[in-house]
Structure formats: structure tokens, C-alpha cells
Image: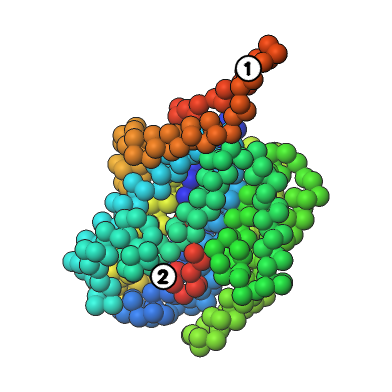
Amino acid sequence: MASVIPTKALGHRFELLDTLRFVAAFAVVGYHWLFRGIETGTMTTVSYSGAAQVASYGYLGVELFFMISGFVITISAHGKTASRFAVSRLVRLYPAFWVAVLITATVTVIWGPPVLHVTIPQVLANLTMAPGVFNQPLVDGSYWTLLNELIFYAMVFLFLFFRLGKWLDVFFPVWAVGMMLITLVVPRFETVPLFGNLFAFFAAGAILSTIQRKGWHWWQALGLVASFYVAVRYMVKDVARLNALDGHFVQSTGVTVAIICVFFLVMIVQTVPSVAQWRIPRSTLLGALTYPLYLLHAYLGFMFFNHFANDSNKWVLYPIAFLLIVGLAYGLHVLVERRPKKFWLKFFDTIAGNPIRWAEGLVGRGRREPERTSGGDAPAPQTDRPTIPPVSEPRRSID
């Protein structure tokens, strides 16, 4: 999932990251349309092509999403109150997601094959982004990544809520080293959210974000090495599990690890100041389309191919389908995310920002020093009031 936030901070956009996000989304689209949908029998009218083996590695785009998310969320949280951070994340995540869920569910009811079906309780549970809490399946299997994003955001939110945001840059390397120790000493806990596996990619991105802002230090380098170890260990185990399923294509451990190495190297390059200032044409638009594209492409694509495609016309319909889904993503971005943004800000500030600010006030009062009343001492300074201006799932659930 998808990284799902605008890569804007410190007065400029990280346009290389915007571009990388779209590349990652394109890889995931290829994974679903050229490989995953056929493998699971969800796409029944087309067969594997010569590109299927390459496309089978496209799921790794999710790992790149998580690294970029860790990078940018760390910058997004810098200097923010918990309430402001929460409102900005809710505005970014939920409006497009709600509409995408309703579109996907509606099309599935009308067009979907028996293997794809939805119910009203399922749709309602999915609107929370955590349907598993209500024992309901996902409306679109690719949405599994969003819960991982939410868990990471919640962790950052708690740091801000308890006014520990200044410690985040120190915490992320410690977190990465902790995950490495867990994988070495008590590996049965590495599947617990935030304890290892995919969360190593968030940690790596967060550490690199700190390096980009503050420069290299030995503890950040140590944390980055630790996150790399956990990430590679997870991917090696995941490839072994996938190959044990006896699918049509064998995943190469070497190729997978090489791709992860490329991700780390590209993200490290982003820490170079001159690279961070790169200007890439249309990158802002590409970055903006990434989240809607990710939300809409999978099941809508499967149903499109089932109704219109066969082996004789699929190479004509693949680019047509991609242009259609990009057009739909653009409409979702403009009509749901961009134009009513002020409404969404007000809406989420009312239902979430106000309660969080109230709770922040209670925490702030509890942390103040008591006023001194003797010896002419001045009262303790008042704390400023805050102001307002994508569980790890098994790889095969990525569909």
C-alpha cells in the first residue's frame, strides 16, 4: 500500500519519492493483472503470458510503499501536535478509501464472479479500514496493507500525544535494533505488529528520513543495518513459503533480495541533499494518483478482464484498462480528495481533532510543574495549547 501521504515537507516536495510511489503502484498493478488474478482463478478469461514471471515480483512494490511511508510520515510528524497529525492523516486516508470501497462493492455486486462477493455488513466493516475486528473479509484483498499503515501511524501519534515527538528520531534506530534482537532471540514474536517482519521497512524509511534532515550518525547507521537485516530475513522466509505452495512460477530468493537491496539503495540516495531537490516533471500528479490507483485497480481490473478480455485481445486491453483505471483514480483524487478538502478538514477536525485536543489539554495539565507560592518565585510556564492550521498479513493476501 500503499505509502499514502503527500511527500511535502520542509518547504519542498521530494519528487523522487513521488515518482517511486507511482512506480511501486505500477508494479503492484502488474502483479495483480498479469499474475495474481490468474493464479487465484479470479481472472478466468486470460492465461499467463511471458511477462508473468517478472510480474510475479511486483508485490514487492508494497515494501517500497512502506519504506516511503516511514520516510515521509516522520517528516510529516515533525513539529506537529497529535491532533493536527491525526486530522491530516485521517483526511489523507479515509475519504478516498470510503468512496473506493463503495465503488468496488457496487461493481462487484453487478459484475462480480461468484468468487468475488460482498455483503452490507462486510462493506460497513470495511469502511473502518479494519474489518477483521468485526470478523468480516476485505472488500478488496489489496486493502490489507492499510491496516499496517494505521498501526504505524498510531505509534507515531502516541509519541506526539504524550509530547515525546522529539524522541522519535532516537526511537526509530532503537526500534529497528529491537526488531533484530527479537528475530534472533525470540522469533516467535516477530509476527506481532511492530515487532518485526514488514515493519522493518517502516523503520528503515523513518531512519533515512532522520538522516536526510540531520545527517549520518553511527546509531542511525546501526538502526538502518538492523532494519535491513530484519527486512531481508522476512523476505527470504516469505519466498520459501511462496515456493512451498507449488505455484506456477518459482520465486528466486536471490532476485527478491536484490530488489530489496535496490530499494534500500534508492532510498539512501534520497538522503543526498542535491537529490532531495530534484525536480521531475509530473511527479506531483503521479504521487497524488498513487493512492487512488492502488485502491481501485485490483478487483475492478479483475472484473474488467473477465468481461472483455481473452488471450487474443489481452495485449490491447491491458493498456486500455490501465488508462481507464488511471482516469478513475484521477477523478477520485480531484472530486473526493482535492476539491472538498476544506470540508474534510473541518469534518475530521470536529469528530477527531476536538476530542484529541481536549485530551491533549488534560495530558498537558498533568505534566505541568506545580506553581510555587513562596519566596517570590514566578509560576511555572504554561504549556502551549495545541492548535490546528496503507497486522502484517501473509503475502498471498495481497490480492
Q: Secondary structure at mark 1?
A: loop
Query: Against 123, is 351 above or below?
Result: above
Q: What residue is pinned by disc 1?
A: 373
What is the x, y in percent for residue 244? 55, 86
- The amino acid beneath tag 1 is Thr
| Alpha carbon distance from label 2 to label 1 | 64 Å
Classed neighbour count for the residue bearing mark 1: other residues with Cα under 10 Å, few (<14), some (14–19), many (≥20): few
Q: Give the residue drawn at x 58%, y 76%.
A: 238
The quadrant holding residue 133 is bottom left
Q: Which numbered mark, 2 or 1, is in the foreground of this view?
A: 1
Q: Give the residue drawn at x 43%, y 34%.
A: 358
**In the shown orientation, is residue 350 left or right of residue 365?**
left
On residue 399, the disc is: 2
Could you tell me if residue 154 is visible in this image? yes
Q: Secondary structure at mark 2?
A: loop
Callouts 2 and 1 close, C-beta under 8 Å: no
Residue sitting farthest toward the top: 376
Q: Give the residue drawn at x 33%, y 46%.
A: 95
Identify which residue, 159 or 217, lies in the foreground: 159
